[in-house]
Amino acid sequence: MAGKLWREAASLMVVGKAANVKAKVARHDFQLLFLKRNEKMSFMPNSYVFPGGVIEPSDFSKDWLDVFKKCGYESSDLLKEFRNAAPPPDLYTNKPYPIIPEVGFRIGAIREAFEECGLLLTHHLPYRDLDQRELAKWQEIVHQDASQFVVMFQELGGCPALWSLHEWMTWLTPAHLGGRRFNTAFFITFMDKIPRIIADDKEVVDVKVISPLEIIKQWHNKRLLLPPPQVYEASRLLSFASYDELERFARDRGKKGMDICFPVRISTSNGTLECLPGDDLYP
């Protein structure tokens, strides 16, 4: 059912340590990466979102098996590493591809982050060793044709850093928003330092590396637009005092599968409520 009603997508929450004391807000010593979507985009224009986008068939290409094999990982290693005992989310089912969905969706999240803002998460190919002009060239190529992402690794070496992505949540776009609807796998990753990010000026027109508290404040004061998943997830992270605490939690909960979050709007006598799982009025 979900495959008929929602397009499948992947999103990446990038968490970095606060660069300095000034960057620390309240008790939080970490920041999040947000990208502002172009006003011409059909879905969530002008909104600040986590990197991400629609999954492509090439994210599940058998060519990836050779890429990982050259880095020392057999397909059996990937299955053992990423297939956990928790029941899989709907978007992982009915995927008769050479690549298991736990890997394919991670590849999609990493690819989208690279396309949108040039952030490339790799193993066996340190980011700092990459020629930035070469990287910019490939960013444009992959932006035009997602199937070239695997070609890039075939030529440059290394492989996507699947191991740095932890499963977090799946979000279903509610019906009341209208337009396109997505079934999105959210992953979370951690970096000691988020590198300098440059908007591609196509899909993305601005970049913020900002604490969860500050982004929520700016949204509350109507200084920027945040879609419901970003509001909810940034608010959840307010519960964590430190980067290290959040990373430990994410590593542990990533082994337990992904819950589904499907917002439901309820009409009342004096307005409307948007309810989420765990709320008393949630169906």
Image: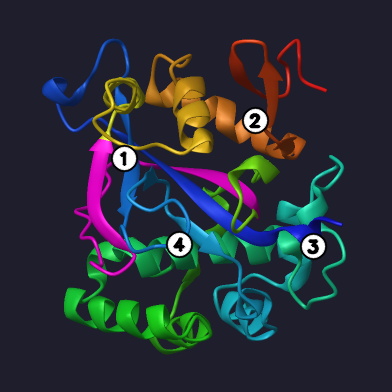
Q: Which residue is mark 4?
A: 42
The stretch of residues the image draws in magenta is 182-209
Q: Do the CB atoms of the residues marked 4 and 2 lie less than 8 Å apart? A: no
Residue in the foreground of this view, choosing between 258 and 224: 224
Sequence-wise, the earlier of marks 3 and 1 is: 3
Kind of residue at badge 1 = Asp
Whole-number angstrom distance, CA of label 3 to CA of label 1: 37 Å
| First in sequence: mark 4 vs mark 1 | 4
Q: Secondary structure at mark 2?
A: helix
Which residue in the protein does label 2 denote?
252
User: What distance separates the C-alpha of mark 2 from that of mark 1?
Assistant: 19 Å
Residue named by callout 3: 3
In this view of the protein, can residue 120 be seen by the observer? no
Q: Which mark is residue 192?
A: 1
Three-letter residue code for mark 2: Asp
Sequence-wise, the earlier of marks 4 and 3 is 3
Camera-nearest residue between 146 and 73: 146
